[in-house]
Image: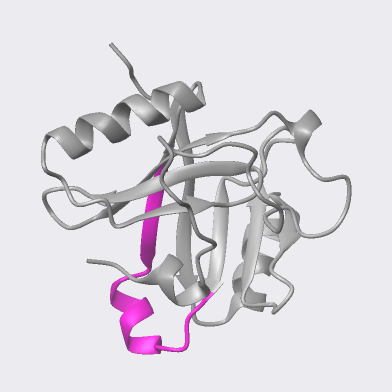
Amino acid sequence: MVKVKQLGHIVLRANDIDDSENFYTNILGLHVTTRRPTGTMIFMSAREDASHELALIKSDDIEDSATHSLAHFAWEMESLEDVKEIHRKCVAEGLEIRSIADHGVSLGFYISDPDGNEIEIFYEMPKSSWPKDGYLFAGDFPDSLDGLKAKKLTDTEITSSS
């Protein structure tokens, strides 16, 4: 039976992304691993071998982010084959696959739990396979999810919830 490897990351909406970055780096000691070139998203980690455990995304809707700051949470799988098996299981159960996402260093898909919380199921390549410089998530993942086309998600798609 396939099971998740670990909680992979959480994406939070931030009203003031600079204040949030300061809090997570200076108070909690996380380090910035990469930034979206537009400045609208910051990826952070406590570990050296993870692309991110926390992502902050700039929210233009102060009221929405004050009450709904969680964009999604993500379960990391041990292998791409495990992601594919969970994907097939979701399809067989009739669950809506919200999107399939190619994040360059990872490949995954998004579903919602029964309460409408958005969940990403993904596999991330080992750090030795990451690009050596530039934006970590800019490239293309070297495989597909059961032949289904993945797409790069926009900030809006990353933060949209059910």
- Which residue lies at the image location 82% right of the left edge and 45% below the top edge? 131
Would you place residue 3 above or below residue 87 in this image?
A: above
Please, which residue is most extreme toward the right here?
A: 133
- Indicate the position of residue 144 as horizontal and vertical percent values: 51, 39
Please, which residue is most extreme toward the front here?
A: 147
Taking depth in this image into account, of 75 and 144 the one nearest to the observer is 144
- Indicate the position of residue 137 as horizontal and vertical percent values: 67, 55
**Is residue 11 covered in magenta?**
no
- Which residue lies at the image location 32% right of the left edge and 82% below the top edge? 64
Would you place residue 1 above or below residue 63 in this image?
A: above
User: In which quadrant of the rendered image does the N terminus lie?
Assistant: top left
- Which residue lies at the image location 21% right of the left edge and 37% below the top edge? 90
Taking depth in this image into account, of 19 and 7 the one nearest to the observer is 7
Q: Is residue 160 left or right of residue 38?
A: left
- Which residue lies at the image location 66% right of the left edge and 50% below the top edge? 140
- Indicate the position of residue 105 as horizontal and vertical percent values: 65, 43
Q: Is residue 50 left or right of residue 102?
A: right
Would you place residue 89 above or below residue 25 in this image?
A: above
Taking depth in this image into account, of 119 and 129 the one nearest to the observer is 129
User: How many callouts does the rendering have?
Assistant: 0
User: In which quadrant of the rendered image does the C terminus lie?
Assistant: bottom left
**Is residue 68 covered in magenta?**
yes
Extent of the magenta region: 58-74
- Indicate the position of residue 134 as horizontal and vertical percent values: 84, 58
